[in-house]
């Protein structure tokens, strides 16, 4: 039995909210491709992620078990018969972040499912990558995701991307009670069985969102990705309190009535870094000398490198995620099991709301894998994803101040984000009003023949995608009183986004305190890895 | 009713051939063996000159090029244009072209081919692609025989922009909501005059301009 003093230390080590004291170590914050080391004011509460849940010891057997013990339907093998038409839909590489080490869980699931289909005499099989309005992946990215064996045998005739702009490739299944059009991929709709292979990174993924969003078109996505729905979503990570998810669920239920969909959902832990970068998984107060040395070496190396080289380097480091759950079967019961596991990994209980919330914005988001986190995506991370990482009450009070660290460089990828450039430089100087942008310009961008062409034949996000990205930050913008960007390398990007600028974190905190007072409560949501708060009181 | 225009350059943008190929084809289709041989020899000798002139001045190139039609009958040129289309232009249509035009049609654009080629050489292509209109050069004919002169102003460079502007005024199309597509820096005025320019399979200079002005860059050479 350890002595009480040791027990206390153990308790401290598992406490997710740490209060900064006079002798606390400086905290590490991402600022794009750089790492900052910042001293925070005494009393600041730092919310740390939960430690990674232990991965499944045998993923292959877990997949097989899930296929044989599905939720709410017959096992997969019992649903197969020779000659039937099957479509397998797969999530794209927008998840997980960073991409996981090979073999990707999607490859592992596909290998088992394809073998089962072949053994059952099912030959008419297509694999469709459910990109919705995301960019098409490169061949190398597809190969990495599904593995060389499957790629060589199936690409490009029977393994291909969903095309949301192919008029012949889509079908209207019906209309929900709220007049939402349900449009899905024709091949999937006309199949005897659709098998959806999903990877949940965060609780907003999966469930009815998989088929209903991944295999639809602009009209289908627009049904729920609009300013009105986003303003009523509190938050994206809490589906029962998200209007967006309510819409997605209505659409998904209609799909389930019209099609036979077998979901295979998986989720992973939060072990983003290991090996030489494993110090990023630790708390700064627990750093050993070797960790401090590695941190300083990494900071110095990153500082000396050109931004493009830093980006290349960081994107090349895959995450060490472990699979922590695999479930299969009907949409809702399967997803419920995955959600429970996801919450266990991410949710940190808190009983407060801060006046000032701080977080670092990293180099990556779901929409810039192997690309640039452009200003619109910085906004998505700040006001969309990170702000929405809560259940119950947000971590920051209504009217509070958000301080984020990022260089906010005016840099875009013209291959991946061509319509973002026009959105940012032509539309945002005119207005930031989401409803006005939607009314005046969304359809123009969606139908722009050049953007449609780039989406269909290149590797570009759909022309309407930057609008959805702007709406994504709508509930964050509505809740927050002020946003301050720290370390921006220019003045105009923060200004176009409606943000203030500060040179240093302490300057930003002073600016925020001038509004909220010296006694303002400050919180730091410490990323990476992902942490979410749960304030249900 | 189309609400905006989509103006497409042809050579290099929608098709993989160019005006020199068309000229060579015509030269090879003279009436007699001797005439064919003479015309072919003239063509072969002229090609380096055309190439050099095209690099220096597109307007000069066009004027020089069209002078070679002098003395040909209008009927013959019309017939040959159809053959030219079937034998040369049709196989050279870029795989991505039909899809790009289809997308413009779905966006309710009036589709106009805008080219420095002669109108009768482009019309079969326009019909094939379902274009609504053609802005092209017109050969001057006297008594059904080509004079080798083009009805001014020659459609090229800055004049393409002017022609598009006048077309939009005539048709009541908003220039700022219209689209233009070209592969060549020589078409910079045509691209700059509309609200939505796009570089298609661009040459090096146009690629640089497109990057600087943040215009989309697309490829029609892929399906």
Image (cartoon, grey):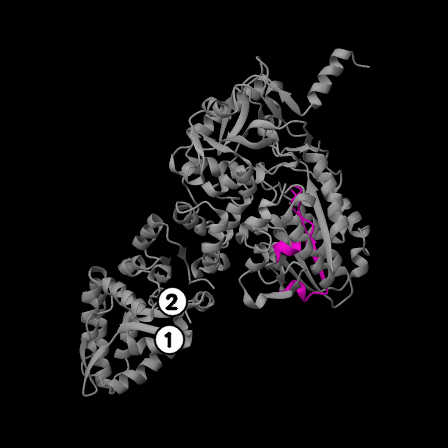
Left or right: A195 as drawn, with respect to B72: right
For mark 2, does the 10 Å Cα neighbourhood hold few (<14), some (14 to 19), or many (20 or more) residues? many
Q: Where is residue A473 in the image (x, y as percent from the top left)?
A: 53, 42
Quadrant of image for the C terminus of chain A = top right
Residue tagged 1: B125
Residue at 78% x, 51% y is A67
Q: In this view, does B213 lie above or below B223?
A: above
Quadrant of image for the N terminus of chain A = top right
Magenta-highlighted residues:
A186-215
Q: Is residue A132 above or below residue A528?
A: below
Which chain is disc 2 placed on? B
Q: Position of residue A183 (x, y in %)?
A: 62, 62
Q: Earlier in the sequence, mark 1 or mark 2?
A: 2
Callouts 1 and 2 close, C-beta under 8 Å? yes
- Distance from Cα at disc 1 to Cα at disc 2: 10 Å
Residue tagged 2: B14
Give the camera-side residue of A388 and A85. A388
């Amino acid at each position: 039995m350890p002595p009480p003093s040791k027990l206390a230390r153990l308790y401290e080590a598992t406490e997710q909210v740490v209060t900064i004291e006079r002798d606390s170590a400086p905290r590490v914050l991402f600022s794009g491709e750089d790492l900052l080391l910042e001293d925070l004011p005494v009393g600041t509460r730092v919310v740390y992620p939960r430690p990674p849940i232990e991965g499944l010891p045998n993923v292959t057997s877990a997949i097989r078990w899930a296929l044989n013990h599905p939720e709410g339907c017959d096992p997969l093998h019992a649903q197969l018969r020779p000659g039937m038409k099957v479509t397998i839909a797969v999530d794209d590489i927008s998840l997980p972040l960073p991409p996981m080490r090979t073999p990707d869980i999607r490859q592992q699931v596909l290998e088992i499912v394809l073998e089962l289909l072949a053994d059952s005499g099912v030959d008419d099989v297509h694999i469709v990558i459910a990109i919705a309005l995301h960019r098409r992946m490169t061949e190398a990215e597809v190969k990495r995701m599904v593995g060389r064996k499957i790629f060589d045998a199936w690409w490009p005739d029977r393994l291909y991307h969903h095309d949301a702009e192919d008029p012949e490739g889509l079908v209207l299944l019906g209309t929900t009670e709220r007049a939402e059009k349900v449009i899905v991929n024709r091949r999937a709709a006309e199949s005897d069985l659709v098998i959806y292979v999903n990877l949940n990174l965060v609780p907003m993924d999966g469930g009815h969102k998989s088929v209903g969003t991944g295999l639809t078109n602009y009209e289908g996505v627009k049904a729920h990705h609009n300013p009105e729905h986003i303003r009523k979503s509190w938050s994206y990570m809490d589906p029962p309190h998200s209007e967006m998810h309510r819409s997605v669920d209505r659409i998904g239920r209609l799909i389930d009535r019209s099609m036979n969909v077998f979901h295979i959902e998986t989720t992973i832990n939060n072990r983003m870094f290991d090996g030489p970068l494993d110090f990023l998984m630790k708390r700064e107060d627990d750093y050993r000398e070797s960790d401090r040395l590695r941190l300083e070496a990494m900071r110095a190396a990153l500082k000396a490198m050109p931004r493009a080289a830093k980006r290349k380097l960081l994107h090349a480091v895959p995450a060490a995620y472990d699979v922590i759950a695999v479930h299969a079967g009907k949409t809702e019961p399967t997803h419920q099991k995955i959600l429970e596991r996801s919450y266990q990994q991410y949710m940190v209980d808190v009983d407060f709301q801060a006046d000032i919330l701080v977080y670092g914005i990293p180099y990556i988001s779901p929409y810039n894998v192997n690309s640039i986190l452009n200003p619109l995506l910085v906004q998505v991370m700040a006001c969309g994803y990170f702000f929405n990482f809560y259940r119950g009450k947000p971590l920051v009070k209504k009217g509070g101040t958000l301080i984020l660290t990022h260089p906010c460089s005016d840099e875009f990828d013209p291959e991946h984000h061509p319509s973002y450039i026009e959105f940012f430089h032509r539309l945002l100087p005119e207005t930031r009003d989401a409803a006005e942008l939607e009314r005046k310009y969304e359809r123009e961008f969606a139908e722009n023949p050049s953007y449609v062409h780039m989406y269909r034949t290149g590797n570009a996000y759909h022309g309407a995608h930057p609008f959805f990205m702007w709406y994504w930050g709508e509930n964050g913008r509505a809740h927050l009183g002020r946003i301050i960007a720290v370390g921006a390398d220019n003045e105009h990007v923060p200004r176009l986004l409606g943000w203030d600028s500060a040179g240093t974190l302490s300057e930003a905190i002073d600016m925020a305190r001038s509004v909220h007072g010296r006694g303002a409560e400050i919180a730091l949501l410490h990323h990476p890895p992902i942490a979410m708060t749960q304030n249900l009181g | 009713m189309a609400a905006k225009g989509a103006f497409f350059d042809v050579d290099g943008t929608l098709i993989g051939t160019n005006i020199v190929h068309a000229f060579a084809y015509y030269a090879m289709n003279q009436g007699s063996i001797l005439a064919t041989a003479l015309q072919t020899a003239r063509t072969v000798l002229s090609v380096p000159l055309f190439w050099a002139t095209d690099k220096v001045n597109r307007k000069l190139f066009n004027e020089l090029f069209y002078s070679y039609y002098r003395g040909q009958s209008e009927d013959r040129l019309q017939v040959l244009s159809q053959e030219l289309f079937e034998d040369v232009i049709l196989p050279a249509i870029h795989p991505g072209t039909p899809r790009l035009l289809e997308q413009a049609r779905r966006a309710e654009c009036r589709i106009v081919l805008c080219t420095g080629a002669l109108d009768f050489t482009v019309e079969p292509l326009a019909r094939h692609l379902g274009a609504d209109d053609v802005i092209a050069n017109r050969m001057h004919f006297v008594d059904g025989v080509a004079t080798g002169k083009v009805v001014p102003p020659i459609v090229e460079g800055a004049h393409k922009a002017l022609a598009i502007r006048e077309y939009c005024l005539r048709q009541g199309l908003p220039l700022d909501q219209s689209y233009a597509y070209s592969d060549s820096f020589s078409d910079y005025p045509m691209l700059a005059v509309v609200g939505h320019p796009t570089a298609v399979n661009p040459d090096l200079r146009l690629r640089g301009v497109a990057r600087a002005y943040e215009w989309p860059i697309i490829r029609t050479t892929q399906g």
